[in-house]
Image (cartoon, rainbow, N blue to C red):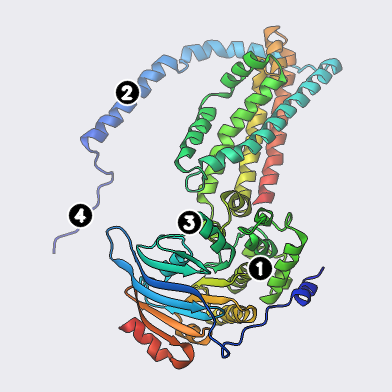
Amino acid sequence: MTAHSVIEAEGPPAPPDLRKAPLPDIVTLRGLAKSYRGGSNVLDGVDMRIAECERVALIGANGSGKSTLLKLLIGLIAASDGSITTLGETFQRAPSAAQRKRLCRQIGFVFQNHGLVARISAHSNVVQGMLGLPGGWRAVSQAIAPPDWRVRALSALQEVGLADKASARADQLSGGQAQRVAIARALVRRPRLLIADEPAASLDPAAGHDVMRVFSERARDHGISLLYTTHDMEHALAYSDRVVALRQGRVVLDEASGALDVLQLEKVFHG
Amino acid sequence: MAEPAVPARFARLSPAQFALVVGFAAVVVVSIGDVAPSLDRLANGLPRMADLVGRMMPPNSDPAFLSRMAWRIVETFQIALVGTVIGVALSLPFAWLSARGVSPIGPFGYGFKALVSLFRTIPDLVWALLFVSAVGLGAVAGTMTIIVDTIGFCARFFAEAMEDSDPGPRESLSAIGADSFSILCGAIVPDIMPSMINTALFALEKALRSSVVLGLVGAGGIGQELKVAFDLFQYRNASAIILAIFVIVLAMEYVTDRLRAKVQ
């Protein structure tokens, strides 16, 4: 079975038409607060929602609570107050082990510094995106992965335009290529929610736009909800449906990106 | 404006540092008096050494002896190779369980760290004596000694490499729910593979040198032949064995150096 035949056989899910009817929320945060021992509130009563298939950019100055919010909504750290509902799992402080397991299976993650394993191939890195799924231990290497996972990984690489680099070692890729492999690794598990923490921060402007475009288009094509943080106002406006801004742990702006411009967003940083 | 002062040539010692330096020097001087070779002992020993070397020449090249020695060399290799392979394989779980920040058993990992230290701090000849007592004379005791010695050496370096491995891939796999064994196999081991191969090659070199002397306490290998040669005053046999040991250790170092260069 070739990568092409898999795409033809399964095909990407048709993107829902957002104009028809409001889609259900995939993430709902109510009064979310987080404070560290002896420190001030990093998040202070955040209310926020993300609808299914929606792409949301989260902006704010350093220390405004963006990364903390990402970690909280999938239960990587425990909240101090409020409630979180992510992908149908509701929890107050932190999810139970079973909830966390179910959450992990439906989420894809892209980090600022791609987090690829340097000495293995791009293909093997993408196969590793299946870890955490049932039977996922076989995804530690493409050499022992089931044949259909290997083909799926190649399809994912094809989607980010890097099928020809499948055998290249991750440490031989450019920064932009490595980040696209990281996107393929997140896509291969067919997540319902894709989370990215400043995915283009370490890239030059051209590579940054390239990565954000691939990222945003693939999420839209597959009907995946997308939440990403960024310090680049152009990225926030161009690749999202909605922008949420945090300042000192509170939501100070929550608007459709079409109704905003760069100057309005910059006010978030300058008070 | 005042003239800037020229910095002192040497840092000034505090009274405590001065006392430490004097105390250390005193211990060295006393120890030299107790255990270092004196000039008259060296003068007396050198002619005897020359006489011994004379009796060792030429090394025995009798085909029957060389064939017996060749089999002992093969056995020495086998002890080193099997002991290293099993030791390296067992070092991985020991390293994983004891590596700080990586171990799936958290603070209980200190127990494994202590066990690895125990393996390392007891000299190989002492382990060999213990195993000879336990399983009898021969190569099996030697192999068991090399296994324990290799775990003590490799598990420590593997654990350090794991602790220093790139946290990025570990975090990204952990975030999608990968279990710690998958993170070990998928992210940590590929990352530290060159360092592990290097350490394993050093362990093989070390094992070969060890397996040569293990025979002195009855744990098999060429060392056993060397002991017999000295016990029976067969100095020409002894020189042939020493020459063979020199060649095989040198050959092993050459091969492992080449392999290490390839891995780099």
Please state which of residues B212 and A140 is positioned toward the viewer in this rendering. Answer: A140
Q: Are marks 2 and 4 on the same chain?
A: yes
Give the foreground label among 3 and 1: 3
Q: Chain of mark 3?
A: A
Distance between mark 3 and mark 1 Cα atoms = 26 Å
At label 4, which amino acid type do we have?
Answer: Ala
Please state which of residues B29 and A7 is positioned toward the viewer in this rendering. Answer: A7
Tell me where residue A255 appears, x and y as whole percent: 43, 87
Horizontal arrangement in the rendering, residue A188 relative to residue B67 (left or right)? left
Q: Which residue is mark 1?
A: A188
Q: Which residue is mark 4?
A: B5
Horizontal arrangement in the rendering, residue A9 relative to residue A196 (left or right)? right
Near mark 3 (Cα within 10 A), the count class, few <14, some 14-19 or many ≥20, is few
Distance between mark 1 and mark 4 Cα atoms = 68 Å
Helix, strand or loop at mark 4: loop
Q: Are marks 1 and 4 on the same chain?
A: no
**Disc nearer the start of the sequence (3/1):** 3
Marks 1,4: beta carbons within 8 A: no
Report the residue that reaches farthest toward the left: B1
Tell me where residue A60 appears, x and y as whole percent: 39, 77
Helix, strand or loop at mark 1: loop
Q: Which residue is mark 3?
A: A96
Q: Is residue B78 above or below residue A17?
A: above
Taking the spot 64% from the left edge, 58% from the top edge, the residue there is A119
At label 2, which amino acid type do we have?
Answer: Ala
